[in-house]
């Protein structure tokens, strides 16, 4: 019986499973409250896998602006935060694998009152895409991730616009 080589398995997976999304959550009530979004990009990436990680943050901001959603130019206490987490590793000789998770949260005051005259606050989740796995060759890996970020943030922006208009 012949053994399947890890590289062959990775290539097969890249053809059959270019991306896997595990779970998405949209909260229409919270999305309707989005006025401004601060994009926070957190990454742990091997240099060969993603040459310019800042491009992914730029892509997310571009999609939001083009959808009519204000983007914070600096850290903001009142803006919703779209956190994009990317971990990318070399999966095989000429290819990489990445895990991407995104969530949109806002620090909000709770209605439960206060403790020692200080209002209680918590992060309120408006959107979450918990896991996406991408496998691909190095030369095309960055554009593949850009496309995913574009599609993911476009879906989020559409949900925000829908929630605002009450559809």
Image (cartoon, rainbow, N blue to C red):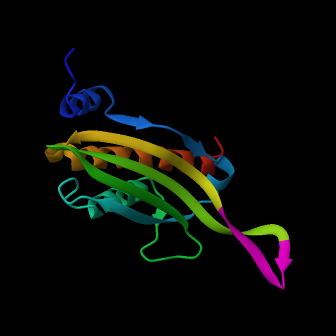
Residue 95 in the magenta stretch? The answer is: no
Residue at left offset 66%, top offset 45%: 166
Quadrant of res 71: bottom left
**Is 140 left, or right, of 123 in this rendering?**
left
Which residues lie in the magenta part? 113-123
Percent x, y of residue 41: 39, 64
Q: Residue at x 21, y 22 (%)?
A: 3
Tell me the quadrant of the picture where the N terminus can be found: top left
State the predominant SS element of the stretch in magenta: strand
Residue at the spot x=55%, y=45% of the render? Answer: 159
Q: Is residue 1 above or below residue 25?
A: above
Say which of 134 and 146 sits in front.
Answer: 134
Q: Percent x, y for residue 66? A: 39, 55
Give how far across and how far down residue 163 sits, in percent: 62, 48
Where residue 109 sits in the image (x, y, percent)?
Answer: 73, 71
- Residue at position x 38%, y 60% from top? 61
Q: Nearer the viewer, residue 22 or 37?
A: 22
Query: Could you tell me how many numbered marks the image carries?
Result: 0
């Amino acid at each position: 019986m012949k053994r399947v080589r890890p590289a062959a398995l990775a290539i097969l997976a890249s053809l059959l499973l270019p991306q896997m999304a595990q779970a998405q959550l949209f909260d229409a009530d919270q999305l309707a409250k989005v006025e401004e979004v601060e994009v926070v990009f957190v990454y742990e990436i091997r240099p060969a896998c993603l040459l310019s990680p800042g491009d992914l943050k730029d892509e997310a901001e571009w999609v939001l602006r083009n959808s009519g959603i204000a983007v914070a130019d600096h850290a903001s206490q009142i803006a919703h935060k779209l956190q994009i987490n990317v971990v990318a590793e070399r999966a095989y000789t000429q290819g990489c694998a990445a895990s991407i998770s995104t969530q949109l949260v806002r620090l909000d005051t709770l209605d439960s009152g206060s403790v020692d005259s200080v209002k209680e606050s918590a992060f309120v989740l408006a959107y979450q895409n918990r896991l996406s796995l991408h496998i691909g060759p190095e030369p095309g890996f960055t554009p593949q991730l850009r496309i995913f970020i574009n599609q993911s943030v476009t879906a989020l922006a559409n949900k925000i616009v829908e929630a605002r208009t009450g559809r």
